[in-house]
Amino acid sequence: MKISYENLEFPCELKEKILKLVNTSKIDVHFVCGRKIVLSNTNLGLEDPNRVIISNKAKYLEVLVYEQDDSFYIQDFAESLSLTRLVKIVNKYL
């Protein structure tokens, strides 16, 4: 079985929205592209999601962004988040 990797591109529109809404003077925002992992000769595959890492000097928050989904996921939360809710969380806690 051969494993192949396909890099995903981070959506430009989403990057622009996040950078507009989050106060970037107080925090650093890094975008990490995800990838698709495909197992040859099977119908199985995995998606390593895109990530947004938002940090200041004391704290950081890692947000997962899946390719076919408009929601955001934080590992500590069991639910998906909208962009508006994510911005509120970032501006409140960081």
Image (cartoon, grey):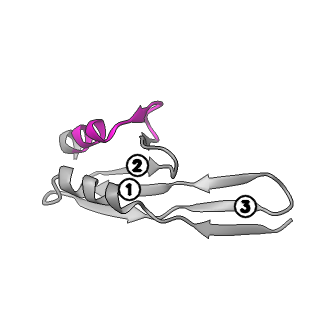
Which one is in front, 52 or 68?
68
Amino acid type for the residue under numbered disc 2: Val
Rounded to the nearest angstrom, the CA distance separating label 2 from label 3 is: 23 Å
Q: Which residues are magenta?
A: 75-90
Instruction: State whether residue 82 is above or below residue 68.
Output: above
Question: Are there few (<14), some (14-19), or many (20+) residues within 10 Å of tag 3?
Answer: some
Q: Which element type, helix, strand or loop, lies under badge 1?
A: strand
Q: Position of residue 3 (x, y in %)?
A: 76, 66
**Circle 1 is placed at which residue position?**
52
Q: Is residue 80 left or right of residue 84?
A: right
Q: Which element type, helix, strand or loop, lies under badge 3?
A: strand
Instruction: State whether residue 87 is above or below residue 78.
Output: below
Residue 48 in view, yes or no: yes
Q: Is residue 37 left or right of residue 39?
A: left
Mark 1 in CB contact with mark 2 (< 8 angstroms)? yes
Q: Is residue 38 left or right of residue 89?
A: right
Which one is in front, 38 or 92?
38
Quadrant (top left, top right, bottom left, bottom right) of the N terminus: bottom right
* Mark 2 or 3: the one toward you: 3
Q: Is residue 29 left or right of residue 44?
A: left
Q: Which residue is rendered at x = 82% and y = 68% of the image?
A: 2
**Magenta stretch encompasses residue 79:** yes
**Circle 2 is placed at which residue position?**
63
Tell me which label, 1 or 2, sits earlier in the chain: 1
* Mark 1 or 3: the one toward you: 3
**Circle 3 is placed at which residue position?**
38
Which one is in front, 45 or 68?
68
Q: Position of residue 53 (x, y in %)?
A: 36, 57
